[in-house]
Image: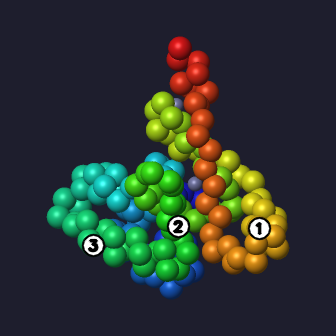
C-alpha cells in the first residue's frame, strides 16, 4: 500500500476529511520522522505556498485530537510532531540533532512511578542524549 493511500485511510478511519493539506502534513512527518511546525511549513510551502503557520497548526491539532499525530515534548527543544506510533523513547544526537525512535515498552515504568509516588503519570516521553553511530564513525 502506498503511503498516500494509507494516510487517506488513516484520516477516514478517524473521521477526518483527507484534505490535500492534511495529506501533505502526514507525508512530511512520514519522511522526516519528527518535525517542528517550522520544518513542516518549510516543506509544505513548496506545494502550498500560501498556507499559514496557524492553518498548519490547526490541521495538526485536529490530527492530534484524533491521535493520528502526537506531539513530542523534548526538554530544551522545540516541540516536534510525529505520526502516532507505539510506545518508544527518543535518542537525540548531540552532534547532528537527529532524533531516532527506539521502541521499548515504558508502561511498566509509569506504573512503577505511580505505585511509588501516588502520582498519576499523564505521558511518558523519554529521551536519551546520544552521539549517533553516523557521527561516531565520521570522526
Ligand atoms: Zn549524529
Ligand atoms: Zn518518535
Q: Toward which corner of the image does residue 23 lie, by quadrant?
A: bottom left
State the residue in front, 123 or 42: 123
Asked whether mark 3 and ligand 2 are closer than 8 Å, the reply comes as no
- Residue 5 shows up from this direction: no
Using the image, tell me which numbered label, if any, was put on residue 78: none
- Residue 139 shows up from this direction: yes
Coordinates of residue 139 in the picture (x, y in percent): 53, 14
> In the displayed structure, would residue 91 be above or below residue 83?
above
Callout 3: SS: helix
Residue beneath label 3, please?
55
Rounded to the nearest angstrom, the CA distance separating label 1 from label 2 is: 23 Å
Rounded to the nearest angstrom, the CA distance separating label 2 from label 3 is: 17 Å
State the residue in front, 77 or 10: 77
Residue at (53, 36) in percent of width and height: 93
Quadrant of ligand 2: it is bottom right
Q: Is 72 left, or right, of 122 in this rendering?
A: left
Residue beneath label 2, please?
70
Rounded to the nearest angstrom, the CA distance separating label 1 from label 3 is: 38 Å
Asked whether mark 2 and ligand 2 are closer than 8 Å, the reply comes as yes
Residue beneath label 1, please?
113
User: Which one is earlier in the sequence, the residue at label 2 or at label 3?
Assistant: 3
Callout 1: SS: helix
Coordinates of residue 27 in the picture (x, y in percent): 44, 57
Callout 2: SS: strand
User: Which one is earlier in the sequence, the residue at label 1 or at label 3?
Assistant: 3
User: Which one is earlier in the sequence, the residue at label 1 or at label 2?
Assistant: 2
Coordinates of residue 75 in the picture (x, y in percent): 50, 54
Residue at (49, 65) in percent of width and height: 71
Amino acid at each position: 500500500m502506498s503511503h498516500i493511500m494509507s494516510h487517506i485511510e488513516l484520516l477516514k478511519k478517524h473521521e477526518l476529511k483527507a484534505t490535500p493539506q492534511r495529506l501533505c502534513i502526514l507525508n512530511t512527518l512520514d519522511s522526516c520522522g519528527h518535525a517542528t511546525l517550522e520544518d513542516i511549513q518549510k516543506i509544505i510551502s513548496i506545494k502550498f505556498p500560501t498556507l499559514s503557520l496557524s492553518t498548519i497548526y490547526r490541521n495538526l491539532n485536529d490530527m492530534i485530537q484524533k491521535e493520528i499525530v502526537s506531539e513530542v515534548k523534548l526538554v530544551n527543544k522545540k516541540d516536534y510532531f510525529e505520526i502516532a506510533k507505539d510506545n518508544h523513547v527518543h535518542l537525540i544526537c548531540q552532534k547532528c540533532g537527529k532524533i531516532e525512535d527506539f521502541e521499548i515498552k515504558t508502561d511498566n515504568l509509569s506504573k512503577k512511578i505511580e505505585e511509588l509516588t501516588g502520582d498519576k503519570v499523564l505521558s511518558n516521553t523519554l529521551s536519551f542524549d546520544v552521539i549517533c553511530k553516523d557521527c561516531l564513525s565520521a570522526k
